[in-house]
Amino acid sequence: MTGKTTSMSSYTLGQKVAAWSVHAFTMTGVAWAVLALLSLINGHVGWMWLWLSVALLVDAIDGTFARAAKVSEVVPWFDGVILDDIVDYLTWTFIPAIFMYLYLPLGPRWLAAVIVVMVATSSMFCYANKGMKAQDNYFVGFPAAWNIAAMYFYVLETGPIVNVIVSLVVMSLTLSTLTFVHPLRVRTWMPLNIAVTVGWLVTTGFLLVARVMDSSAVDNLWVFILWWIFGIYFIGIGIVRTVLGRRKMEELAGIAEEEGN
């Protein structure tokens, strides 16, 4: 006990303030989640997507801040991973699932309810899965990104048959070994991954605004084409990683040799 107390007290006030500032930044995700849910309840779909986008931005960069501030060492009793998972479940899974029930065609109401319950529960096999991330930071299995799935259904204005079938397929991928790239943490072709991510976010934002304003995605043809190219890239690189495995993927990118030097 004495050794642990001494270790914890060895951090400066500035380090503790920095660590708690990172936790506070992550906690803003709860606020964005509440605002998104209230917007959804009040029928303001555009605002819901805006608040979920803000939450997505926070989620994308808070991990970098956390590692820089060494939050797990400075404040060991407060688990930032659990905090992050709670926020992620709200913003990546739960609120998008409710959106799917209220605003997407999923067949009869009873079927829509069943699908949404399955979305919410199947995602637990992602959040509670200790092997969710591979050593090279690829997600193993679908990472419960139902905000992205729901957004595709919404922008493409797909019908109930497509929505139900695709939802069931995506749920099954949660338990698969198919890998999905984490664009900000996977080292293999990281600059390209980040560039594609930025392009995808910009085109997605454009198409979401157009959809909220009752414009069809294909009315913005070049944006629509680029959006598909970016999306296919993410799926494609995940498939390649699944087929090749971590070591061959890193060798292909020259990372293994780089680390050896």
Image: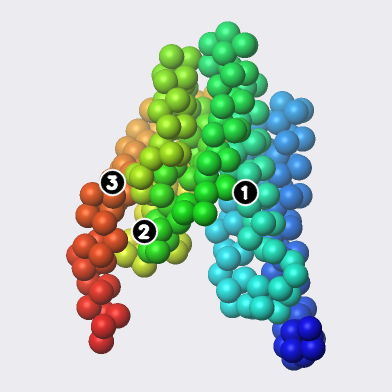
Foreground residue, 130 or 57?
A: 130
Closer to us: mark 1 or mark 2? 1
Image position, residue 119 (x, y; %) = 56, 30
Kindly report the distance in space between the C-alpha atoms of the residues bearing marks 1 and 2. Answer: 21 Å
Give, as a three-letter code, the residue at label 3: Ile
| Residue type, numbered disc 2 | Asn
x then y, percent, for residue 166: 42, 25
Task: Name the outermost residue toward the front.
Answer: 1
Q: Are marks 1 and 3 in contact (CB under 8 Å)?
A: no
Determine the residue positioned at 73% across, 58% down. Answer: 27
The image position of residue 39, as x and y in percent, is 73, 34
From the image, tell me which residue sits under label 1. Answer: 88
Is residue 227 placed above or below 43 in the rendered structure? below
Q: Position of residue 155 (x, y in %)?
A: 48, 29
Judge the density around disc 1: few (<14), some (14-19), many (≥20) Cα neighbours within 10 Å: many
Q: Which mark is residue 239?
A: 3
Q: Nearer the viewer, residue 184 or 120?
A: 120
Mark 1: amino acid: Asp
Q: Residue at x 57, y 47 (%)?
A: 127
- Return the disc, 2 or 3, that comes first in the chain's sequence: 2
Colour style of the rendered protein structure:
rainbow
Q: Nearer the viewer, mark 2 or mark 3?
A: 3
Residue linked to disc 2: 193
Whether residue 233 can be seen here: no
Task: Write the residue at 42% across / 20% down.
Answer: 165
